[in-house]
Image (tube, helix red, strand yellow):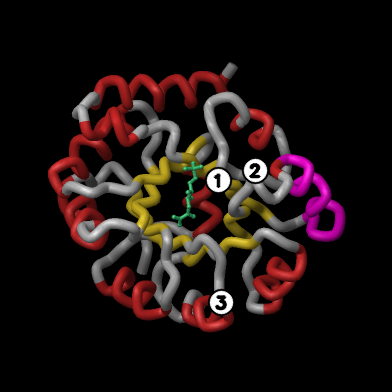
Amino acid sequence: MSRYNVEQILNLANPVMPVLAISELDHAVPLARALAEGGLKVLEITLRTAVAMDVIALLKQQVPEVIVGAGTVTSVAQLEALDRIGCDFAISPGTTDALLCAGKEVSMPYLPAIATPSELMLGLQHGYRHFKFFPAETYGGVKTLKAMAGPFADIRFCPTGGISESNFEDYLKLPNVMCVGGSWVAPTAMVEAHEWSEITRLAQQAVAKTKR
Ligand SMILES: O=C(O)C(=O)C[C@H](O)[C@H](O)COP(=O)(O)O
């Protein structure tokens, strides 16, 4: 059983859930520690790299202060494999009927993504109340989320995709947004150059901005 439910995870992720595509296993621990030190403790490890599953298992073992989630979950087989290795939560960039069903059976929280009202309504039918909104900027960003708050007032979102230091605060002002997701707090060039203290600074900057 995961330590947290989806509501707690999204609350703890505020203001930003770093979206990470880690290509070298050696980067995982220092990167997670750098982000945690900066105040960002809920991480989305995308399954876009060959080592992603190993990264998740390693972080679960060695960095207990972070909450380790998986992103880019596109199949039920992946969801079940993540559950077996004790991942804390799973996120998809979209969803399918099969994933919505399987997400209710696994022991960790599953966050499906939507981009339209019809996709949202399919998720509602399956009992979901929290969604990733992806790709946020391309699908109307803040304006779309404001429109969704009319018919779907009690639904909460984690918008992701195209969000950066320059616009994340606009999203966090919305009552239906619990946190945003973004890769800007851990740029690939900084990770490759092992600039861990710079990454801590980016994380601190995001946290400080939202406390003003
Ligand atoms: O891989 C996934 O599962 C995704 O859902 C995509 C990521 O969340 C976005 O690619 C992050 O967006 P950026 O912050 O614009 O880089």
Q: Could you say which is closer to the camera, residue 144 or residue 103?
A: 144
Q: Is residue 81 above or below residue 207?
A: below
Disc 1 element:
loop
Left or right: 100, with 116 as reference point: left
How far apart in space, not on screen, are marks 3 and 2 (Cα)? 22 Å
User: Residue at the location (36% across, 69% down)?
Assistant: 1
Disc 2 marks a residue whose amino acid type is Glu
Q: Position of residue 59 (x, y in %)?
A: 22, 50
Q: Which mark is residue 151?
A: none
Left or right: residue 208 versus residue 27 is right
Q: Is mark 2 within 8 Å of ligand 1?
A: yes
State which region is magenta: 142-153
Residue that protrudes farthest toward the left in the picture: 26
The quadrant in which residue 185 appears is top left
Residue drawn 27% across and 39% down?
A: 32
Q: Is residue 134 on the magenta stretch?
A: no
Q: Position of residue 8 (x, y in %)?
A: 50, 51
Q: Is residue 10 left or right of residue 203?
A: right
Question: Where, by quadrant of the figure, is residue 57 drawn?
Answer: bottom left
Q: CA distance from mark 1 to mark 3?
A: 19 Å
SS for tag 2?
loop
Residue for badge 1: 161
Q: Nearer the viewer, residue 7 or 139?
A: 139
Q: Secondary structure at mark 3?
A: loop
Residue 152 magenta: yes
Mark sitting earlier along the chain (3/2) = 3
Question: Would you name the residue on which mark 3 appears?
Answer: 96
Can you say which quadrant of the picture contains the C terminus? Answer: top right
The alpha-carbon separation of the residues under discs 2 and 1 comes to 6 Å
Identify the residue under disc 2: 137
Between 48 and 95, the residue placed more toward the observer is 48
Q: Where residue 34 appears, x then y in whole percent?
A: 27, 30
